[in-house]
Amino acid sequence: MTDGKRSSIAPAGRVAIEDADGGRAEFGPGEAFLVPAGFDGCRHTLGPTRKIFVGVSAR
């Protein structure tokens, strides 16, 4: 997904993050989450969603 960390907040809608081992977490309006560097998995958009994210990579 990314080489660096990614912090996100979903002001509207729902998203799910699923890792390569099948672990899954869902986030809704106002909830924030962090995707760690090297994350192996998928992000699922569960309907109309607005998302704000900040990506940070090491140099």
Image: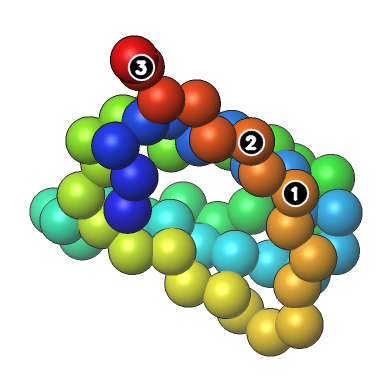
Which of the two labelled residues, at mark 1 and mark 3, occupies the earlier sequence position? 1
Q: Mark 1 points at which residue?
A: 52
User: Residue shown at 66%/44% (left/top)?
Assistant: 53
Q: Which residue is pictured at 26% across the width and 57% down the height?
A: 41
Q: Name the residue under label 3.
A: 58
Give the amino acid at mark 2. Val
Q: Rate crowding at label 3 as few (under 14), some (14 to 19) or many (20 or more) other CA atoms within 10 Å.
A: few
Q: Distance between the residues labelled 2 and 3?
A: 14 Å
| Rendering quarter of residue 32 | top right
Tell me residue 44's x, y (percent): 48, 72
Q: Residue 25 carries which label?
A: none
Query: Marks 2 and 1: CB-CB under 8 Å?
Result: yes
Task: Where is residue 5? Give x, y as percent.
Answer: 43, 29
Residue 43 drawn above or below residue 3: below
Is residue 8 or residue 20 the one in the foreground? 8
Residue furthest left as drawn: 21
* Residue drawn at x 29%, y 37% as measured from the top left: 3
Rendering coords of residue 14 (x, y %): 69, 67
- Furthest residue toward top: 59
What's the distance in space between the residues labelled 2 and 1, CA to CA? 7 Å
Q: What residue type is labelled 3?
A: Ala
Tag 2's secondary structure? strand
